[in-house]
Image (cartoon, rainbow, N blue to C red):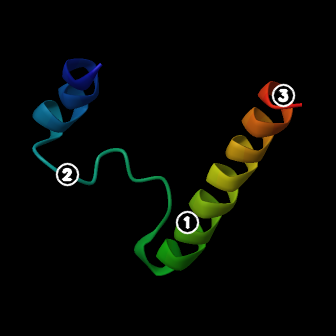
Amino acid sequence: MDVIIAIPFAFAHSPDVLTLMPQHWQFLANYLGVIILLAIGGWIYWSVCR
């Protein structure tokens, strides 16, 4: 998987190839990432430990 993800970086010669949100929305991306991580963790906990 790492090799497949590295292909766009190698072709573009830039670490920003897979950036989805603009730099000034970085705080929103961080909060969304935490919320999604907690939601997936809660879903796994609810479906396995129930």
Residue at label 3? 47
Sequence-first disc among 1 and 2: 2
- Say which amino acid is labelled 3: Ser
State the CA–CA distance, disc 3 to disc 2. 37 Å
Residue 45 - label: none
State the CA–CA distance, disc 3 to disc 1. 27 Å
The answer to whether residue 38 is above or below residue 1 is below
Residue that protrudes farthest toward the right in the picture: 50
Q: Quadrant of residue 1?
A: top left
Residue at label 2? 15
Marks 1, 2: nearer the viewer = 1
Q: Position of residue 47 (x, y in %)?
A: 84, 28
Marks 3, 2: nearer the viewer = 3
- Say which amino acid is labelled 2: Pro
SS assignment at label 1: helix
Horizontal placement of 6 versus 17: left or right? left
Q: Quadrant of residue 23?
A: bottom left
State the CA–CA distance, disc 1 to disc 2. 17 Å
Residue at label 1? 29
